[in-house]
Image: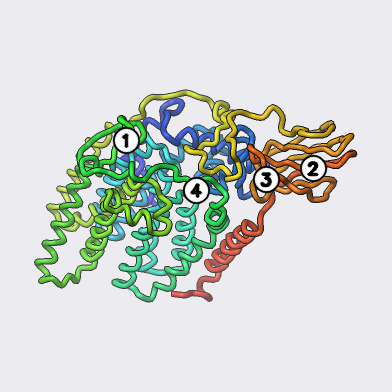
Amino acid sequence: MKKILTILLFSFCISIPAILPFFHKGYFPTHDGEWAVVRLGDMFRALRDFQIPARYSGELNFGYGYPLFNFTYPLPYYLGIFIYTLGAGFVGSIKILFAGSVVLSAFFMFFASRALWKNNWAGVVSAILYIYFPYRMVDLYVRGSIGESLSFALFPLLFYLVIKLINKPSSLLIAGVGISVACLVMTHNIMLVLFMPIFIVFAMIQIMLKNKKVMKAFIVSIIFGIGVSSFFWLPALFEKSNILLSKIPIADRNLNFASLNQLIFPSWGFGIPTGSDGFSFQLGLVHLAIFIAVIAALLFIFIKSNKHIKDYSAITAGVLVILVVFYIFLLFKPSEFLWNNVPLLSEINYPWISLGVLGFSISLLAGFLCRQVISKYIVIILGIVSIAIVLPYAKPERYINNPDSYYLTNSATTTSSNELMPLWVKEIPLQKAANKVEVISGSANLKNLSFNSKKIDFYISASTNTEIKINTIYYPGWKIFIDKNIAQISYNNMQGVMEIAVPAGEHSVSGKFVNTPLRAVSNAISLLSVIMLIFFVVKRNKYAIY
């Protein structure tokens, strides 16, 4: 326990220079950072309304609502709510998540690199280089992607757990890998797609080299991860055809490939990558030098061993080098055929986002060089140089000091291109409706109106047959009842909001957002997977599979 606390303290100390701006009063503008605060506030409202799991935002999109958390990775916001309940505030909670992701990245990377290369200095060097990777500063101070930042902490955690699982399998480690996979699924969709291939290949190589018997346990852990996260990924995948993202990409991929100059030469900017002040695509001079040094070391080992390498560490490093080369290839225009045709990869519009996986892989590879005394000290010096080069980027463009109330009253969609808008919305809302419920034909009076993110209730006194418009965008799961009898919902209007016909007389009208069959099954799979996971761990001696 004392050693773990020491490593945690080390991780915090080396992270402080990189995260110091998060301790500044207020916040700072990034591409997505302030949206994260707005979304956290909306998650709070959804959970307060007992919408569990949260799927539909009732307040955002100018009060018209939209299925935000049905598609947006939810785990950062669930974690944010936990921190918020401890008294951190919405802005403070997001800042803690960002800063904490850096500390945990270093913490888990130390363990992953040390376990893989069996060297304490490997853990130290890899942890430093993983934090002081240029794209990490881009993510913290330019892009502000909370899901992406947290996923960087999960990468080394997954590598560490699978290494431990292979060396000494146990039910707890199987559960740990499964839960970590589930967390990555719920933390950042794109990083999941980019990271899982390298993780699967790494795990398979390690299993084949060291312990083939653990293959079954590894597969079970992946199945657990998929099952636990089903409540999120199943609806997000199969309901995507309902939203604008299924028809129009967020960005033109052709404009987001990197050039060789951008990859090698240092640069910095706070704008979008296609602008004149676009953010940096640099891989980092130190990281490039280390990658080249690893290749040179492997070539030396290959020649010295007479082309028959029996060193497991060298084989692992060689596989990682091949994967790094592949991910570097993905950054450039010639890889376009892969981005266009490979399932799931074709859903990603930003090739430069591969930089996140590259930063992890090269930082991990740095530990391989620590096996020799001379190269160990060289890599340590390079790590210090990396801090000196990258640290000046660890600062925001400027500071702002908006209170939580500012973000709670922000009613935008928190999306760049309205990509989560249902397809039947032909006229995007630009301001709040004057009234939540309107009479569009006939004569009626409304009273006792109440509503939140998952329900709406009111009484209506209609002197004639009446058409009512509820200014909430329809999405599958909404049901309207008139005197407890289900009503036919029409949403064939410019706003895509719900309209119903109410007969003359006194009536109670209630609307509820409920689970569709797909979501009910998805929730059940997740719940069943959690129960099975707990049972599996508790009964590990009787039902061991390794």
**Residue 50, which numbered label?**
3
- What secondary structure is marked by label 1? loop
Name the kind of residue labelled 1 in the image.
Phe
Viewport quadrant of the C terminus:
bottom left
Mark 3 against mark 2, which lies toward the viewer? 2
Marker count (numbered) = 4
- Structural crowding at the residue carrying mark 3, measured as other residues with C-alpha within 10 Å and reported as few (<14), some (14–19) or many (≥20): few
Mark 3 against mark 1, which lies toward the viewer? 1
Q: Residue at x 82, y 41 (%)?
A: 502
- Dot 2 corresponds to which residue? 501
Sequence-wise first label, 3 or 1 = 3
Check contact, mark 1 vs mark 2: CB within 8 A. Answer: no
Sequence-wise first label, 1 or 2 = 1
Sequence-wise first label, 3 or 2 = 3
Name the kind of residue labelled 2 in the image.
Ala
- Dot 1 corresponds to which residue? 279
Name the kind of residue labelled 3 in the image.
Phe
Using the rendered image of the protein, determine whether residue 183 is visible from the camera's viewpoint.
yes
Q: Is residue 41 left or right of residue 182?
A: right
Mark 4 against mark 1, which lies toward the viewer? 4
In three-dimensional space, the C-alpha distance between marks 1 and 2, rounded to whole angstroms, equals: 52 Å
In this rendering, the answer to whether 541 lies above or below 164 is below
Indicate the position of residue 381 as horizontal and vertical percent values.
Answer: 17, 43
In three-dimensional space, the C-alpha distance between marks 3 and 1, rounded to whole angstroms, equals: 40 Å
Name the kind of residue labelled 4 in the image.
Lys
